Image (cartoon, rainbow, N blue to C red):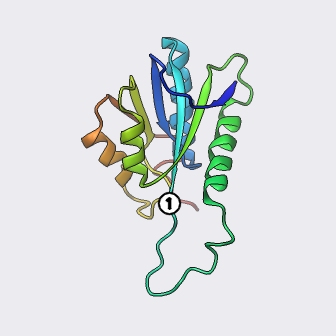
Amino acid sequence: MTTQASGGLSHRIVVGVDGSESSKAALRWALGQAHLTGAVVEAVTAWEIPVAYGYPAPFLDEVNFPELATKVVRDAISEVRAGSTEPPPVQYKVVEGNAARVLLNESAGADLLVVGSRGHGGFVEALLGSTGQHCLHHATCPVVVIRDSVVGQRGR
């Protein structure tokens, strides 16, 4: 079952999903933890309009960012849940804003916040991305950082 988040759940695991392999590994882990604890997983995707300095960005009128973000989170949920016989319920939420700030806000009152070790950021060699690091330092609930088998390997 995949539904949009409705709030008011007593046991929640919030997981940041940006479509990266690391975020899918985090979602997979969160589903396993939810199965063990009876919690509901809330997959959260944040989006922002890209910043262009000095020039108007010609593509802004052509891209529906909320729709694109919704596709990313729904595709990730479908991919991770594929082949599972009885996966726990997953809700999703798409929110405009900085990813770290959105995850911190959405994880208020949650049992856990789960993030991948790196998303689509530019520092490939970093062990932990800036969003995950910000969440580790500022979250009001426990944070779990998941590394997948691809993390740390360079494309060859």
- The extreme left residue here reads 137
Q: Position of residue 33 (x, y in %)?
A: 49, 20
CA neighbours of label 1 inside 10 A, class few (<14), some (14 to 19), many (20+): few
Which of the two residues, 11 or 120, is positioned nearer the viewer here?
11
SS of the residue at dot 1?
loop
Q: How many marks?
A: 1
Left or right placement of residue 12 versus residue 73 in this view? left
Examine the rendered structure and indicate whether residue 104 appears above or below residue 55.
above
Q: Which residue is mark 1?
A: 48
Left or right placement of residue 146 versus residue 83 in this view? left
Which of the two residues, 19 or 46, is positioned nearer the viewer here?
46
Q: Position of residue 126 (x, y in %)?
A: 37, 56
State whether residue 149 appears in this view.
no
Residue 89 falls in image quadrant: top right
Which of the two residues, 29 or 154, is positioned nearer the viewer here?
29
Examine the rendered structure and indicate whether residue 64 appears above or below residue 115.
below
Examine the rendered structure and indicate whether residue 134 appears above or below residue 81.
below
Q: Position of residue 142 (x, y in %)?
A: 32, 28
State whether residue 36 appears in this view.
yes
